[in-house]
Image (cartoon, helix red, strand yellow):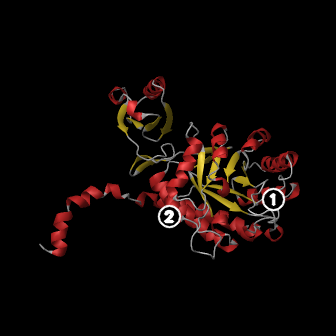
Amino acid sequence: MLVKMSRDATPEEVTAVEEKLHALNYKTGKMVGEEITLIGVYGDISQLPVVEIQEMGGVDTLIPISRAYKRVAQKGTAGNLIHRAVRLGNLKVGGEKLTIIAGPCSVEGEVQIMEAARIVKEAGADALRGGVVKYRSSPYSGWEGIGSTSEEALRNGLKYIVKAGREFGLPTVVEILDAADLPLYEDIGIDCLQVGEVNSKNQALLNRLRDTPLPVIHKRGNSLDIEAYLLWVERVMSAGKENVILCERGIISPNRYTRNTLDLGGIAAFHYQLSCLPVAVDASHGTGIRDLVHPMTLAGIMAGASAVLVETHPNPLIAKSDGFQGLFPEQFAGLVKACEKVWELRKRIEAHYIPTVKLDRKYEARAEADKKRFYGSA
């Protein structure tokens, strides 16, 4: 259930509604738009005293939500959607600016991650990414990350990327594989946790992430349909956590040319129809081909992404993992410039997007007359 407050509702009236709901043992979540405020109500809605809430000061209307992923679900009305912004360090993901998160697939050492951070910063990107422990489906696949051998190794790897991020003023994004490692990530100063594709359905890890104050980038599993993915994201948010970012990184399909098939339609569905959360596009994993990362990243922005994840390395040819999809520094610098231009274009043309619901009634009203005009009385 959503409580839609009127445009002239005061902060005191909003607070009064929240306090009333809390007194009735409901959890709430608030979304503040430019014109209206929505209060999400979570619990057994069948017991909600609807009339009593409806008559409170400042309340416009109560809106039932049918989707099972209630916290993740889109808020607002057609043509006036409300999207949540998420704080990542000093950044605001999902706000007026595009967020570019970049770095090597894995942290390979202090010198390497420092050089990568410099490249990311000088190109004009916003945050530094890098894996410290890498998931491998086979024990013979090679490099499992600088932090894979012991807790001390994990600690040192995390320290390297935090040091690099702070040196260049970049918030850090690091994948977490094990729920037991969460306190270490928090204590060392990682700014954002990433749930990788293989852990997109890791119930124990997702449950544990409910309690962290850190923002979470949750990557879509490559075999998950859109609504199943959003339900797994809902698991992280179900106890009240708000700062989660969706990430499309490619799905399994009959296509075998690219590493995965980047689901641009999924990005558009998340942004324009299904979710209130910011969406990131990861074309590095979505294609697995260095020369396709540039065009597909730009396509993802136009589809609705407000954040970009990109792999870049000081020299991808000697990278210890996924060098084939990592951009050379010059390619990355060009991509950042292109991303900024495409973002500006999208913001300029967004006003031309007209959702179907705003036209349905108009065309339904003239359907019979149009049938006669187009097809005759028969």
Q: What's the amino acid at mark 1?
A: Glu
Q: Assess disc 2: are there few (<14), some (14-19) or many (≥20) residues with their C-alpha within 10 Å of its C-alpha.
A: few
Looking at the image, residue 300 sits to the left or right of residue 59; the answer is right
Q: Position of residue 21 (x, y in %)?
A: 45, 27
SS at circle 1:
loop
In the rendering, at what x and y percent does residue 197 appear?
Answer: 65, 57
Asked if disc 1 and disc 2 are in contact, CB closer than 8 Å, the reply is no
Image height check: is 58 above or below 38? above
Within-10-Å neighbours for mark 1: few <14, some 14–19, many 20+ = some
Q: Secondary structure at mark 2?
A: helix
Question: Which quadrant, please, contains the N terminus?
Answer: top left
Relative vertical location of residue 203 with respect to residue 19 in this rendering, above or below: below
Give the farthest residue toward the top. 23
Q: Which mark is residue 265?
A: 2
Give the tally of numbered discs: 2
Q: Which mark is residue 144?
A: 1
Vertical side of 106 occupied by 10: above or below? above
Q: Quadrant of residue 13?
A: top left
Q: Identify the residue shown where x is 76% and y is 39%.
A: 183
- Specify which label sits upstream in the sequence, 1 or 2: 1
Q: Quadrant of residue 316?
A: bottom right
Residue depth check, mark 1 versus mark 2: number of the one nearer the observer:
1
For residue 224, the mark is none
Q: Residue at x 69, y 53 (%)?
A: 126
Amino acid carrying label 2: it is Gly
Q: CA distance from mark 1 to mark 2?
A: 33 Å
> Which residue lies at the image location 67% right of the left edge and 57% below the top edge?
198
